[in-house]
Amino acid sequence: MKASQFLISTLKEAPADAEVISHQLMTRAGMIKKLGAGIYTYMPMGLRVIQKVEAIVREEMNRAGAIECLMPMVQPGELWRETGRFDKMGPELLRIKDRHERDFVLQPTSEEAVTDIARQEFKSYKQLPRNLYQIQTKFRDERRPRFGLMRGREFIMKDAYSFDRDEASARQSYQKMAAAYRAIFDRFGLTYRAVAADSGSIGGDMSEEFQVIAATGEDAIVYSTGSCYAANMEKAESAPPKGPRPPAAQPMTPTPTPGKATCADVAELLKLPLQRTVKSLVLATDELDSAGEIARTRIWLLLLRGDHDMNEVKVGKVPGLADFRFASLAEILEHFGAEPGYLGPIGLKKPVTVVADREVAVMADWVCGANKKDFHITGVNWGRDLPEPDIVADLRNAVAGDPSPDGQGQLAIERGIEIGHIFYLGTKYSAAMNATFLDEDGKPKPFQMGCYGIGITRLSAAAIEQNHDARGIIWPDAIAPFTVVICPVGMDRSEAVRQAAESLHAELLAAGVDVILDDRGERPGVMFADWELIGVPHRVTIGERGLKEGQVEYQHRRDETAAKVPADGIAAFVKARLAA
Amino acid sequence: MKASQFLISTLKEAPADAEVISHQLMTRAGMIKKLGAGIYTYMPMGLRVIQKVEAIVREEMNRAGAIECLMPMVQPGELWRETGRFDKMGPELLRIKDRHERDFVLQPTSEEAVTDIARQEFKSYKQLPRNLYQIQTKFRDERRPRFGLMRGREFIMKDAYSFDRDEASARQSYQKMAAAYRAIFDRFGLTYRAVAADSGSIGGDMSEEFQVIAATGEDAIVYSTGSCYAANMEKAESAPPKGPRPPAAQPMTPTPTPGKATCADVAELLKLPLQRTVKSLVLATDELDSAGEIARTRIWLLLLRGDHDMNEVKVGKVPGLADFRFASLAEILEHFGAEPGYLGPIGLKKPVTVVADREVAVMADWVCGANKKDFHITGVNWGRDLPEPDIVADLRNAVAGDPSPDGQGQLAIERGIEIGHIFYLGTKYSAAMNATFLDEDGKPKPFQMGCYGIGITRLSAAAIEQNHDARGIIWPDAIAPFTVVICPVGMDRSEAVRQAAESLHAELLAAGVDVILDDRGERPGVMFADWELIGVPHRVTIGERGLKEGQVEYQHRRDETAAKVPADGIAAFVKARLAA
């Protein structure tokens, strides 16, 4: 490819609404152009990256035995009513009406459409297992689209769906996809981590996220420094605390803490470690009557160590708390007689259910609110000062330094960007849609399903979040818009430069290298700045002076300076660098 | 590829709503599956064809210097308001609202989006010419979607848009695309014709359709048997009649023609050739006042030879008739005093403008309605019996046997399916959207544009309309889902058959041949019927008996019978057939 035949369009400044580095750099490098909120044109430079990502995904999915199809972008509402998602999903599901006022949706995923195919096509257990996938434009009407391709409304996703006759086989299909995902992400040349994830309302214990590691990532990833344990923050287990509760050593003492409404402030005032404080969170659950009205409300007090954060997913798994909400101020005052900031489990006005985190349950001589404004209590001890907690459970987020739940090593935390997610679905969709096959015993059974997504466009942004510097993007070879750029200096003045550049271009092209020759006639400074912004990993600079000495310059995008390389061996040199 | 790893799903019967052969065969061959009216899933077998079509289009577009990008499927309504199309287009433009009640459309084409890119990117004449294209899902909310992929609502289209600084350059860009289209359609291996088309409301004289020739085509194509002249029926010129009008020979005579309201019936009754009759068509045009109310209506009488059909596009080009409508019965009775079937230009109640087709203008002793029920007039002659026509023009469709308008050969007519259309647009969109560049003289000028479409999914259907027989589809090699199928007979019983089949499969795969090995273990009859229905062009059958004699069978999909080929040379034999 010659640059003069391509559309290169770089910008000095990022648009004002570009909050994250990938959005800024993709816009500045001319990869994307905004058409509306969360809606982007993939410009030629950006589309090349997306097509390379797609090609790798397609190859590995095919290798894993998945079969590609393409389901419609516009799908009938009636199909989405079969699973209830037409009504249950929020406004991120864009519902539309055609000219005949019939309901349709723009697909955010395709579980319904693919299950409809399966129930027509896979009549017998002999046709199973099957895995159908597509690489297709999706639409989610995000309330606040932002961060460029990281949270757009229209995006490209690879979504695969497996159909099996029983759970054992479905678990195999799932593992096959897990392996394919590792093969895919290995090929991208990105640092990533596969982490256990919560399977949410779907149930089952199999769900993994694939996270591209990046300091700017939205997700916290918890991993062990001593084993392969890794999970997202929602899912990551905290190891149970070691040893028994120490004996009580201090008397229980109400203490004035005027204006100190946080554990940190109280610890500082009292000159105690934060780990000695306990924070109180008040939740409520509503029991509905047959008419759907609230019949009874139960109030819960959650106790967490002052330096710990509540994990909402874990709290939701405490029996009775599946549908919890935070209590209202009125409810808090009614039960505690004090405002948040000074709450605690001692001296309640009305009974509440006390749920202590496992760490809190083994604490002695702790500090909590006194249920009286501007007062806390020190030296509190279970059993002596208050009854043992009603429930003890893992309620908190894991923190760095926690022992790994598998007993090997400590937990560490890093940030990641989710670009893949695999799920064992069970019969959630097949049962709802009456999608069955005839099993060997002649009886109809619902398919055991799995679903497997990769955010193609999001991945291209995540790669940038992970790989950039002050000068611009740094693409891994596998998904760079071009792998090599040739920058001839003074090509219009020097026939030798032109010939050397053209000949290297032709030789690399013939070897199947994705090379671009910058024949725009720009000054070296402009050329270098453009290609460093765009992030092409390998650059060869050819100048008249160097040629006279039989030399050209090679610089990897991560190198600080260029290296001189004999001109007559440059093609082989570059090819060797690509293979490396 | 092995059939056991792929999704092969053939049907004996076509669905009841499949009216055309391509819809029937694509459904029966398991290429497409209906999800809603005019909305189809491309099943694995169908997607392979579509991807091959896309690859050829992409290669040739790139070769012609066009640059690929991808514009959003969901586009802001405000952009479509800039050209007025948001309001002007009919309900085939699907308008949707997002969660914030903002207007969007599902793109049927992308003129607005691409012009928006151009006005941001192409600031200077130095950046021109440019051609941007995409291969993207489109949506048109057809009132009555039908014929499978021939007239679906969601479909895949390649659309390209050229931007030039002046008309001369724009014409070159257009010609480059015309050449690229020929290269593309040549590669598909289909019989097609590029025909001149009317450029409609856009103006200009450059527009060509690419028509796949098929007896079932919706469009009539007119071409010369003696030159390369070809046009669609709307556009095809009728050569002017030869020689002057003969002198009048008969007296004008009113003649009873009870119940004979068509030219054919009248000619039969009077034992005259149909070519001696003249049909009368009554049109009206309304002149509006400043308030948009009808101020005045003008009535026009169109006269065409009895054996000719009116061409609405040509009629619309007669000065004053751009916005014609057919007259109401009340208007006809008011001006002619008779019902349709007995109308003519003689004895009018009120003045009408008489427009005669060129052929009618040179007729003598002709027959027309008498403006009296059940009566016609014979022996009518211009000048003697009525004034010369107010306007003489080409009003009719060309018919087979007409002289070619370029004077070389005669016109013939065949049926076609439009699968490509190229247009010179001028400044229609750029002017409306204020999309300008700075020209060499420092002044802003609107881009000269062209647009160029290929219906990717429609093409796959058109290929079938052209290439099928009673047994199924017959794909050209270039776009077949698989080029070669290997059918081993008794593979599960015979190790020799298995080895020969596997080895041929491996050898062809290694040679880059798109081959499928039918390892499903079906009986020969089932295998052959499936692959003939699916339309794979080359088939190799391997059986134990043949192998003992050192032979296998080869059959092209168009061959009536299989030929015996030495087993040890079969791979080379097949490769030679593919190259042919």
Image (spheres, coloured by chain):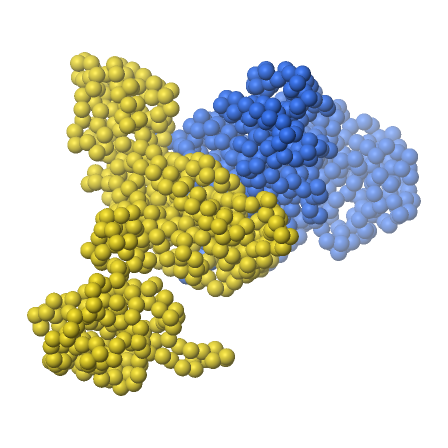
Chain colours: A blue, B yellow
| Nearer to the camera, A98 or A550 | A550
Q: Residue at x 44, y 47 (%)?
A: B174
Q: Is residue B204 above or below residue A277?
A: below
User: How many marks are shown on the rendered structure?
Assistant: 0
Q: Is residue A480 visible?
A: no
Which image quarter is the N terminus of chain B in?
Answer: top left
| Nearer to the camera, B390 or B89 | B390
The percent coordinates of residue A360 (x first, y second) are 76, 34
Q: Residue at x 28, y 23 (%)?
A: B576
The percent coordinates of residue A424 (x first, y second) are 50, 34
Q: Residue at x 91, y 35 (%)?
A: A271
| Nearer to the camera, A557 or B96 | A557
Q: Residue at x 51, y 40 (%)?
A: B67
Q: Is residue A524 visible?
A: yes
Which image quarter is the C terminus of chain B in?
Answer: top left
Within the image, what quadrant is residue A100 found in? bottom left
Q: Is residue A175 above or below residue B271?
A: above
Left or right: residue B576 versus residue A135 is left
Left or right: residue A357 versus residue A5 is right
Left or right: residue B1 versus residue B123 is left
The percent coordinates of residue B453 (x first, y second) are 42, 48
The percent coordinates of residue B572 (x first, y second) are 29, 19
Q: Is residue A399 above or below residue B362?
A: above
Q: Residue furthest bottom?
A: B349
